Amino acid sequence: LRKNVEDFTGPRERSDLGFVTFDITADILNGERGFIFDWNVKQLFLYLSAEYSTKNNALNQVVLWDKIMLRGENPRLFLKDMKSKYFFFDDGNGLKGNRNVTLTLSWNVVPNAGILPLVTGSGHVSVPFPDTYETTKSY
Amino acid sequence: AVMDLFGDLRRMNKRQLYYQVLNFAMIVSSALMIWKGLIVITGSESPIVVVLSGSMEPAFHRGDLLFLTNFHDDPIRAGEIVVFKVEGRDIPIVHRVIKIHEKENGNIKFLTKGDNNEVDDRGLYKEGQNWLEKKDVVGRARGFLPYVGMVTIIMNDYPKFKYALLAVMGAYVLLKRES
């Protein structure tokens, strides 16, 4: 569902604000090597980002949720009914009726020392936004 | 041993002194050339930075060293760790990109936030500024080494330590004799 509210930190015109609830089931592996937490992995910074195009901007990416997973924690995620951690504001009114909003889970591998790779998980979800604004529901 | 050193100094004639000074100058020039070379290869004006705050914990701590690149054609994407400077301020800030809005012509505006901070960086930007642009970016964090940058922080916080270190280095180079 979506609500049109004023974005207090953005431009003066009203911008679309999106609300998304999601479930995540994921098994974070390291390609063919299997287990992601090897001796040089200190933590993973996981984030769920929404990517979409609008009339105003050819490419938009908004991080909706993130989580730090330390070495030792279980790399399997089984989250249900999560709400986005951060406000999903568009730069304009590009969310209304947008059929092509893709949610992807990615993670930043933080080593004990060395290179910092960014990995995108396989499998993504399309979230179509409705054509009208929602004025009655609360989040 | 200290008396030997002073004995050495007196016995050194002008030629040897000039030789030592030239040696020293060569070491300094080589170091500078390597630094400039790094700037060219990475495309960043500051390819190695020290993490100054705890706003990216537990990934990076104060004193960690970061290696940056800043290739012009590298797109800025959500999730990346960037080092940027707010217009008018000298201090580089290391945070993560959490929002981008990019136009077809490549013009991009983006928002950053420290992993360990509750709120995004809008409070850190200039008065009235709500987004960062490519020109604010010093580089993207590609690799890191823990603890190594602590030396720089100590030298900043305790200038006496810096002068002592420089004095020791200077004495060593000038007095060292090539056999």
Image: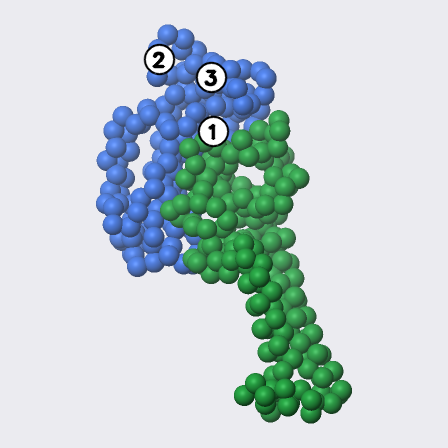
Chain colours: A blue, B green
Spatial CA distance of label 2 from label 3 is 18 Å
Going from the N terminus, do you reach mark 1 or mark 2 first? 1
The chain ID associated with circle 3 is: A
Outermost residue to the front? B3
Answer whether labels 2 and 3 touch (C-beta < 8 Å): no
Query: Which residue is identified by label 1?
Result: A52
Q: Residue at x 33, y 25 (%)?
A: A83
Q: Is residue A85 left or right of residue A33?
A: right
Q: Amino acid at mark 3?
A: Lys
Tag in front: 2 or 3: 2
Residue A138's tag is: 2
For the point 57% across and 46% down, the residue is B92
Relative to A31, say whether B31 is above or below: below
Is the N terminus of chain B in the top left, top right, bottom left or bottom right quadrant?
Answer: bottom right
Residue on which disc 3 sits: A96
* Residue A22 appears in the figure: yes
